[in-house]
Amino acid sequence: MIEWLLLAVLIVLSIVDVIWKRFPSGFLTGLLFLVAIVAYVIQGETALALGLFSFIIGWMFLEFGVPINGVADLKVITMIGFLLLDLRFFFLFISMVMVIGFIYQIIIMKMFSLKEDQDVAFIPVITLCYITVLILGGVI
């Protein structure tokens, strides 16, 4: 149930990211907290570990500037990490975010003639990767 609710929120966030590139930070933080609690109740410590791993990997992406652009992307990656079943799906998700993210960023920057310092909406890529993992059965 929570995975479909998160999917609906991710679709809305993708649209908002493409159009405005701004999010209410409190909303994402509250949703992150809610997802963490529900995942812990359903899956236990595994959910917390995968959420922590997702946060660390997302923070590394943020530090290096590739492929994510902001804290909202970091929060979304962490939320999804809480809902993954095991390390296989975690590495699949992270790998997809990296590979598809790089390709997406290059294509969008070339298509719209964006400069290196301009932000590219990235939550649609995260949503696509989440949908793929959801279809493969890797979400609680």
Image (cartoon, rainbow, N blue to C red):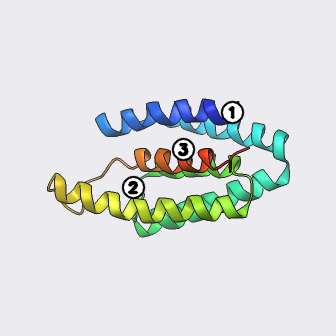
The mark that comes first in sequence, 2 or 3, is 2
The answer to whether mark 2 and mark 3 are in CB contact below 8 A is no
Q: Nearer the viewer, mark 3 or mark 1?
A: 3
Q: Which residue is mark 3?
A: 131
Q: Residue 129: image x %, image y %?
A: 51, 51
Q: CA distance from mark 2 to mark 3?
A: 21 Å
Quadrant of res 69: bottom left
Q: Residue 35: image x %, image y %?
A: 69, 38
Q: Which residue is mark 2?
A: 69
Q: Amino acid at mark 2?
A: Asn
Q: Amino acid at mark 1?
A: Ile
Q: Residue 62: image x %, image y %?
A: 46, 62
* Residue 108 left/right relative to 133: left
Q: Which residue occupies 45% across, 35% down?
A: 13
Q: Identify the image quadrant of the N terminus.
A: top right
Asked which secondary structure carries label 3, the reply is helix
The label number, if any, that marks residue 2 in the structure image: 1
The mark that comes first in sequence, 3 or 1, is 1
Q: CA distance from mark 2 to mark 1?
A: 26 Å
Quadrant of res 106: bottom left
